[in-house]
Amino acid sequence: MTGKLGPEALAAALAATGADDPAVAQGPAYGEDAAAIDLTGAGETLVVAADPLSLAAESVGTLAVHVACNDVAASGADPRWLTHTLFLPDDDPDRLRAVVDQVDATARDLGCAVVGGHTEVLDALARPLCAMTAMGTTDRFVSSGGAEPGDRLLLTKGAGIEATAILATDFREACREAGVPPATLDAAAEFLGEVSVVPDAAAVRDAATALHDPTEGGVATALVEAAAASEAVFAVDRDSVPVRPETRACCDALGVDPLATFGSGALLAAVPPERVDEALDALDAAEIEGAAIGRVESPADEPAAGTVRIDGEPLAEPPRDELYPLWEARDAGA
């Protein structure tokens, strides 16, 4: 039935609220329509980011938390509070519990409190839709558009981390039929535990002039977005972009470019050349892989601003994420 959840079902959803936080003056509760957060003693800037997620059916709650928190972390802040709007295709209590348990566990791992939101049934949907808003504070906001000519471009972990986990779970049988060994798929599915860039950002934010986290469209789209925001040209060497063997195997099996598909788990950072070693050492100390993949250049003319060159070839427009055709083909055959 379309409409709000009843009090009992809503109480089950509200039981999962992430980490306890004394700054939450009013958290989620039946009959309450707003949260209250006491910012006394907080950092100077409140950073807010919102994202919806629906397509990664098996882990939508986990990914929804990470994707929103990653945007806050990639702005130089520590994510701390979440609001969660959840639309369900039916009133199946097991489906509700699966999603809210994922949200709760992931929020607790990140030290975030779920402070409010909204939950209802919308039978026009085929799968759950999670819209997550993350908030955090910082004394130094780092934008996507702060990259300066001469800066070096760093990437953490590798391209297609999130897509690898999705391919190994939502498209496991297709990958297996294409020849990906079960052990590789098992390892790839574990990448879901690496989609957070909260620790990555904490390690490099002091040295960075700009931060951006790849999501839809992957590393390629993140480069285009950050280059456009910085009004600069990003020159990248494709062979320098880390791609894990599991990612390569899953992507090759289904014809997906690792640089052009969901990239949560990687963090793109622009860093002055004299601070590259400092940033890479900080990542190493945090046991996070990092690599230099290119540099920031001044545009030779105004139309070149916002251009990305990969191996010298211009990429002026962000690609359409290469997982979408796979979902579309699957839905058309359902």
Image (cartoon, helix red, strand yellow):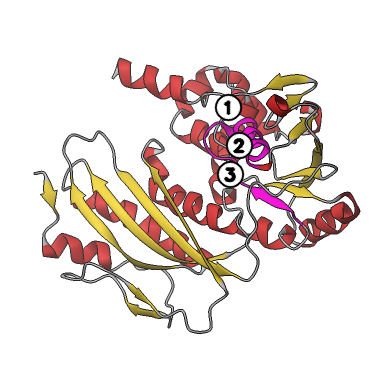
Front label number (3 vs 2): 2
Residue 160, can we see it?
Answer: no
Q: Is residue 136 above or below residue 42?
A: above
Which amino acid type is marked by label 2?
Answer: Glu
Quadrant into which the C terminus falls: top left
* Contact flag, marks 3 and 2 (Cβ < 8 Å): no
Q: CA distance from mark 3 to mark 1?
A: 24 Å
- The answer to which image quadrant residue 318 occupies is top right
The boundaries of the magenta stretch are: 208-229
Q: In the drawing, does residue 143 fall left or right of residue 6?
A: right
Q: Is residue 237 part of the magenta span, yes or no? A: no
Badge 3: residue crowd in 10 Å (few <14, some 14–19, many ≥20): many
What percent of the width, then of the height, locates residue 203? 72, 61
Of helix, strand and loop, which one carries label 1?
Answer: loop
What percent of the width, then of the height, locates residue 26? 30, 77
The residue carrying mark 1 is 318
- The answer to which image quadrant residue 317 occupies is top right
Of helix, strand and loop, which one carries label 3?
Answer: helix
Q: In the drawing, does residue 82 fall left or right of residue 220?
A: left
The residue carrying mark 2 is 225
Identify the residue at image location x=21%, y=40%: 89
Q: In the drawing, does residue 185 fall left or right of residue 8?
A: right
Which amino acid type is marked by label 3?
Answer: Phe
The first of marks 3 and 2 along the sequence is 3
Name the mark on residue 264.
none
The residue carrying mark 3 is 191
What percent of the width, then of the height, locates residue 243? 71, 33
The residue lying furthest to the front in this view is 302
Q: Is residue 220 part of the magenta span, yes or no? A: yes
